[in-house]
Image: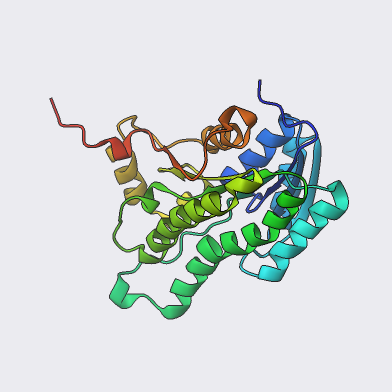
Amino acid sequence: MIDFTDKVVIISGAASGIGRSTAVKFAKLGAKVLATDINMDGLAQTATLAGGEVTTLDVDVSDENDCQKAVDVAMDTYGRVDVLCNNAGIGGVNARVGDMKTADWKKVIDVNLNSLFYFSRAALPAMQSTGGGVIVNLASIDGHIGMSRFSHYISAKHAVVGLTKCIALEYAVDNIRCVSVAPGFVETPMTAEDLSEEQRGLMNAIIPMGRGSSPEEVANLIAWLASSEASYITGSSHVIDGGILAGFVLPE
């Protein structure tokens, strides 16, 4: 059985969706959780659902100082950081490359890519000081394929896969693993907001399993990858997509 007793886990974007489910999962497995987001009401609900030992913190992941603050709080409060789950992300506006505004591009890159660099850079020395750790980066199947009208999101998620490989290579000697998780269509508040009913219907239609995943299913994979049961896994991207990337299902 996976056990995170006495382990300290930082999760970004923990006020809803995958982040909330991941915080709940780790807390129920015994971890001390530092749940971060800019939505403090959502974080309070997450802490209530999780039970256990959950500390909430207002963190804007696009601000490198806020990311450092979160790691400092974890170290001051618990004395260690064992797992960092870089989950925070946004979908952004739907536009072709030629119509994309610079501000809209930068906003998605800041939240979906730069934040992972800021948070990882802050957490790595903390993990080194206590003998190792695990960084789990939330990528997407969009980090492996393209999709029209979401060039900012696609570009960021491709880069997340690359950043994951670099961290894994550079810090394996320090007993630090780094992996990425690549969900397909997940039923979250973000997808409900960013995708129209028609687009969501199309997503379900191309999924061989016929449905999007729940946030809890993704959280289960994250927790396993962060556990000692995955001790020889690093630098890799782990798809959880109901079969989308497996190929096409032809009609009978």
In the rendering, at what x and y percent does residue 105 appear? Answer: 44, 72
Label tally: 0
Residue 37 place in picture, x, y as percent: 68, 57
Q: Residue furthest bottom?
A: 102
Please tell me whether residue 219 is drawn above or below residue 198 in the rendered image: above
Q: Is 134 displayed left or right of 4 in the figure?
A: left
Q: Residue 225: x percent and y percent?
A: 56, 35
| In this rendering, position of residue 60 left or right of residue 139 | right
Q: Is residue 237 left or right of residue 210?
A: right
Camera-side residue: 7 or 132?
A: 132
> Which residue is at a point 31% across and 40% down the rendered structure image?
245
Looking at the image, which is closer to me, 155 or 228?
A: 228
In this view, which residue lies farthest toward the front?
Answer: 173
User: What's the coloring here?
Assistant: rainbow
Residue 135 seen in the figure: no
Q: Position of residue 239 (x, y in %)?
A: 42, 39
Residue 241 in view:
yes
Q: Is residue 150 above or below residue 74?
A: below
Quadrant in the picture for the C terminus? top left
Q: Residue furthest left?
A: 252
